[in-house]
Amino acid sequence: MAKTYDYLFKLLLIGDSGVGKTCVLFRFSEDAFNTTFISTIGIDFKIRTIDLDGKKIKLQIWDTAGQERFRTITTAYYRGAMGIMLVYDITNEKSFENIKNWIRNIEENASADVEKMLLGNKCELEEKRQVSKERGEQLAIEYGIKFIETSAKASIRVEEAFFTLARDIKAKMEKKLEASNPPKGGHQLKATEPQRKPTNWLSRCTLL
Amino acid sequence: MGDPQSGENSQYDLYLQEIEGVDDYWGPTFRAIYDNDQNVKFREKLDQRIQHHNKDIERLCNVYYQGFIEAIRELLEVRNHAKKLNGQVTTLDTQLHQAAKNISKSGNELLQARKVQSNIAVVIAQLNLCLPVLTSYSKLKKQIAEKRYYPALKTLEELEHSHLLHVANYRFSYQLRESIPKIRESIEKASMSDLKDFLENIRKFSPKIGEVAMKHTSEQLASDPTVIGRKKKRIAPQPSGDGVGHFSEEDLSAQELIDFSPIYRSLHISTVLNTRATFETYYRAERTKQARLVLQPPTNMHECEESYRAYIHAVLGFFILEDHVLNTGNGLITRAFLDEMWTMALSKIVSALQTHSAYCTDATLILRIKDLIMLFCTTLRNYGYSVKPLWELVRELRDHYTEVLMQRWVQVFREILSKEDFQPIQVYDLEEYEHILSSFPWDEDLPNDVVFPHKFPFSGMVPKVYQQVKEFIYACLKFSEDLNLSQVEVDEMIRKSMNLLLTRTFSGCLSSTFRSPHINLQEIIQIIIDTGYLEEATVYLDQFISNITGEESRGVSTGVVQGQPAMFRVAREDAVRQICEKLRQKLNEFYELESYDWLLGEPSGHASSYISDLIAFLQTTFQSFTNLPPEVAQVACKSACEHIANSMFQLLMNDEIKQISMGALNQINLDLLQCEQFAASEPVKGLQEDVLLSYFTKLRETLDLFTSWDWPTYFHDYGQETSKYKQVNPDDAIVLLEKLKEGDKKTMFTVLKKNERDKKKLLETVLKQLRQLTQITPNK
């Protein structure tokens, strides 16, 4: 079957319950917003194909439940993720403080080179703000990751956030490819499994 | 005379005497004298004598003169007297004349008067003869003028046969006689036109009559509910118990509002004129025409109740009048005629009402129409018309009403569902808590001390829908209110409608909710949970109906609440289907990410990442949705497995993939292994492992056959129950084999070793064999 994309990036959205992960994803995937709060159960995902520097990139974005009771289920998804969005709610101090815990979770469960990004959501609720932008930036710098304040409701910089993360992953991956594969290689390697090299499976060399 | 002479004297004397004595015969005397010659002497003597006589005369004269004077004197006196007398007589005469003049005048007058009198007597006699003619003629005129044609006709007859005969010789009587036929004709015409007026009049008036009749019936029904539906006699005089004898227009029975006299008159007249047959025909024809008009419903009748009312009133009025005419019209119309007309009318009424009510989408209007028809029926029955088809119509209308109600409730449900967030209800205080419990019967053990916020397992839709079903039941009931149905019927009807509402309407609404692309798995699951609660609540709805109808609850009487779970089964099944569908959509998304290298030389040694993700996702999902009822989870899981297996098989069979390498097949095998592992892992409680695995059997057998290249066994055991590869279809095998062949060509074109050639030959043989099988199979 002809492939419809060049790269597949798996992204993960984490953060406290109610910070708006699902809404951010909903905004990005369907460009819509739902006011009723429906707490995510377990895990869900959406797929959106974006065009980045002439490449078709499929983003499979996993939306996790923020609730504690699903923690074991959701952490299983850290491993496969190539990019993680850490989301907090700028009107909720607690969710910001918990980012540290989420980072720890990532360190424990995700692959080391996973691309991360910090999102301060609900930035349209300026009058209810509890976490200043500076504190967000401060935290991002501490962890050496990018930071964007978004609003899923007002559709502010959601798109930008995902594109930025995708672009970073793409850059990182292409660099890696170049390192392991001299550009001479005529065979396009699959982006999905760049790190997994064929293990010793009854190797039978037929070609070379 | 002297003496001396005496003797001579005496002779003379004699002669004188003789002359004196004799008057005339004097001749002899004178002869004698002359003869004697005496004549001289005699003359002397005669002179003497004459002297003497003179003297005598003189003396006499002297003597008599005195007397004469005296006489003259007396005469003069007499003359005076006579004159006097004459005057007196003349006066008397004039007086008499005067007096007599008046008398004679009166006499004349009297005469005249007598004459007149006798004339008058004659005239009176004649007039007496003519008078009856004239009086009856004038009576006739008056009667005609007063439109009392029948008496007029009678008068005319009398005039013609008894009066006019007596006065034949008058001009007027002649004229009268001449004009009689004309009058008769004009009476006929007039009575006909009267009839026409009457017909026109009743046509105008019949709606009013219908209205009044309906009003009476409704009053009667209101005052005596027990008479509903019972066969009653014509509107009887109000029971005397009323006390007050008020006889206004209100109390007149409907037909009394109309003056039927024109028709009776016309009928009498036509009878008299011997045109009764024509009259009857005319009347019937006219009424039939009118009936047709009356039965023609207004084109926009479905728009408002008023039109229905007007139509029904008109029809009713028409037939009330006709009934009255039948009863009083002395055979003007016959029972058969009326029955025939009624039968014709009934079918028209029914079809008109049917057609128009079918357009109606307003439940309230249908209710009103029903009431109208009911009243119509009762009234008609009071007048002895059979109304059976109308009852059937009402039944039909009831179905239509239910339909309309359903449509209305579709809106209600849609509204509820559109506002629904499909999240369990969360209440924050006791009041809210109590409110939920009061609006929805929930007999689960409630915790003694509720901690707020408290979560109910169902979403807000459940109590709302429950309430709405109750509302619906009330609405249904409204139709059957005075429908005169037995409680069993009402009960049955309501149950049927409720069933329909829940199985069709509500389910339909739920289904369209499922169709919404924005609904997610979680919401559908909540819907399933909700339907579970609604299902449990049907027992209460059942009781609720029983309370209303007084019928024993079906659920209790039959032991099993049969059919009631079915009310939500449809919705539930649909919801389950939707869950499966949503899951399938998610799975399809995974398949979008599939990136098989169909010419893969060596398999990676582990399952493709999309399959791993897919399996992980499924596992997570089934783990997370702890509130998913087990049987639903089982169905969903089965459907997911089936879909995975089918999708993978479809990948292999995909037309666009022309070549497949053995390596790729091995990779698929690895992926399948992963799936099989999942299937065997009991991802959902209560499923036997074989059930899920069975979905992968076909794929497994196919892959086994191709990877082990065990064609001899395949062909040997083909068609047998025990065959290892019994699910491998030769057609599919051909497709896959062709792909492998193509794949081989690409990779092997340089290597033309002997064993490769053998392999190729074998492949051709297998293909040939398979093709033979496919040709046999259809005949089997």
Image: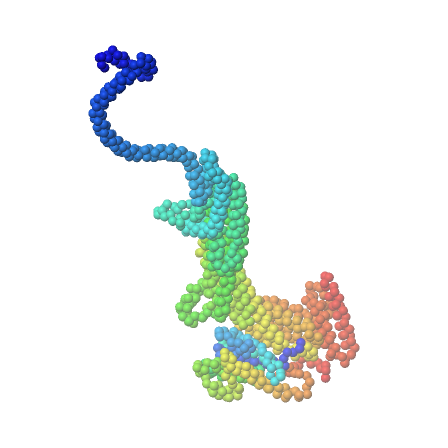
Query: In front: B207, or A60?
Result: B207
> Furthest residue to the right?
B754
The residue depicted at 71 percent of the width and 70 percent of the height is B733
Residue A68: in sight, yes or no?
no
The quadrant of the rendering that contains the N terminus of chain B is top left
The residue depicted at 45 percent of the width and 43 percent of the height is B144
Residue A205: in sight, yes or no?
yes
Query: In front: B148, or B60?
Result: B60
* Residue B609, quarter of the rendered image: bottom right
Colouring scheme applied when the structure was drawn: rainbow
Query: In front: B172, or A164?
Result: B172
The quadrant of the rendering that contains the C terminus of chain B is bottom right
**Residue B284 location (% of width, % of height):** 53, 45
B77 vs B658, left or right, is left
B449 vs A84, left or right, is left
The residue depicted at 76 percent of the width and 72 percent of the height is B764
So how many labels did they put on this image?
0
**Residue B229 location (% of width, % of height):** 46, 49
**Residue B269 location (% of width, % of height):** 48, 41
**Residue B541 location (% of width, % of height):** 47, 59
Query: In front: B657, or B725?
Result: B657
The residue depicted at 42 percent of the width and 66 percent of the height is B435
Above or below residue B188? Residue B697 is below
